[in-house]
Image (spheres, rainbow, N blue to C red):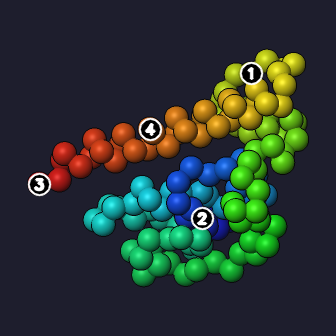
């Protein structure tokens, strides 16, 4: 049975983080999307910037993040991926793209899909806030 480890990061994951998570069997979650009182997702362990409610409930996984540089080192991590890697990430997300698209076009599609995902998560959070009274 596979263990589920939630990797909490603040904001939208970069393509490099997504690739790292896939290679290390981590499930990415946005730590800024969690609000006190939200339901706690079932997992075996957590890592990264996990909210305190998750830290209280689950063990912290010992993950070697040395393969990831800080965002200050290189501002545009998507361009570090090859076109083939970006195409694979787009395909995983169900994003259609031209097979002959330039790397810059692929990066733009990936960034747009990540931003749309983030906005969708924010909309779901905001919609749920009206129900709490």
**Left or right, 68 with reference to 57:** right
Mark 3 sits on what residue?
133
Residue 102 in the image: state x and y as whole percent.
Answer: 84, 25
Mark 4 and mark 1 lie on one chain; the one further toward the N terminus is 1
* Residue contact at pointers 4 and 2, CB within 8 angstroms: no
- Residue 2 location, quadrant: bottom right
Mark 2 and mark 1 lie on one chain; the one further toward the N terminus is 2
Mark 3 and mark 4 lie on one chain; the one further toward the N terminus is 4
Q: Quadrant of the C terminus?
A: bottom left
**Element assignment for label 1:** loop
Mark 4 sits on what residue?
120
Mark 2 sits on what residue?
7
Q: Residue at x 68, y 80 (%)?
A: 62
Residue 50 in the image: state x and y as whole percent.
Answer: 50, 71
Residue 56 showing in the rendered view: yes
Q: How many other residues sit within 10 Å of disc 1, few (<14), some (14-19) or many (≥20)?
A: few
* Residue contact at pointers 3 and 4, CB within 8 angstroms: no
Q: Residue at x 68, y 29 (%)?
A: 109
**Element assignment for label 2:** strand
- Residue 105 location, quadrant: top right
Mark 1 sits on what residue?
97
């Amino acid at each position: 049975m596979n263990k589920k480890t939630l990797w909490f990061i603040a904001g939208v994951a970069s393509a490099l983080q997504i690739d790292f998570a896939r290679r290390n069997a981590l499930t990415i979650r946005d730590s800024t999307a969690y609000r006190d009182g939200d339901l706690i997702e079932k997992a075996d362990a957590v890592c990264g910037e996990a909210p305190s409610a998750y830290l209280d409930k689950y063990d912290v996984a010992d993950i070697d993040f040395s393969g990831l540089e800080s965002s200050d080192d290189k501002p545009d991590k998507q361009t570090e991926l090859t076109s083939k890697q970006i195409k694979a990430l787009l395909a995983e997300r169900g994003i259609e793209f031209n097979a002959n698209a330039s790397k810059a076009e692929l990066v733009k599609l990936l960034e747009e899909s990540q931003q749309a995902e983030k906005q969708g998560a924010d909309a779901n959070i905001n919609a749920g806030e009206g129900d709490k009274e």
